[in-house]
Image (cartoon, grey):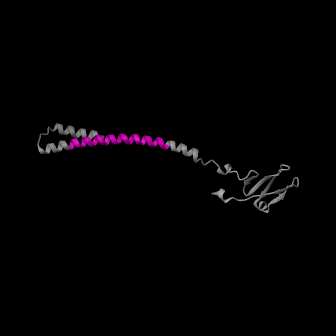
Amino acid sequence: MSMTEKVAYLKGLADGMELGEGKNEKLLKAIIDTLGEMAETVDDIDGDLDAFCEQLDAVDEDLAELEEVFYDDDIDYDDDYDFDDDFEYEDGLYDVECPSCGEVITVDEEILEEGGIECPACGENLEFDFEYDEDEEE
């Protein structure tokens, strides 16, 4: 039973008792009228709250869709970062293509620090100018 229905029941009881115009009867009628107004206000608030909850659910669903698009866990952000056109980074190793013969040579950081290597396929001297830029990491 809703609040409005309960107040209507009380009002019906008071009308059925045929209350007179004495002080107690006036007080009882005023209390019942006040309860009626309160019940209507509570019903209005309940209706507004229901509408608000529906809108909030819709916003929550939209936000969940946006989170899937922008925070997709399947995206590998390292794939989007281009370290250098000549180098392909993988587990501490770099693949370098010889400009003379096209041979792909895998080198580690130690060889890069030495500054160069001879291509095993054609003998071309390959020089590396590999500098770490701290600003790129930030």
Q: Is residue 111 magenta?
A: no
Apparent side of residue 100 relative to residue 58 in the rendered image (left or right): right
Apparent side of residue 11 relative to residue 138 in the rendered image (left or right): left
- Image quarter where the N terminus lies is top left
Q: Residue furthest right?
A: 122
Q: Main secondary structure of the magenta part?
A: helix
Residue 109: percent from left, percent from top: 75, 60
The residue located at (51%, 44%) in the rendering is 63
The segment highlighted magenta reads 31-60
Residue 91: percent from left, percent from top: 72, 56
Q: Is residue 57 magenta?
A: yes
Residue 129: percent from left, percent from top: 77, 58
Apparent side of residue 98 relative to residue 73 in the rendered image (left or right): right
Position of residue 94 relative to residue 39, above or below, is below
Position of residue 35 relative to residue 78, above or below, is above
Apparent side of residue 39 relative to residue 120 in the rendered image (left or right): left
Residue 27: percent from left, percent from top: 16, 45
The residue located at (47%, 41%) in the rendering is 58
Q: Total marks drawn? A: 0
- Image quarter where the C terminus lies is bottom right
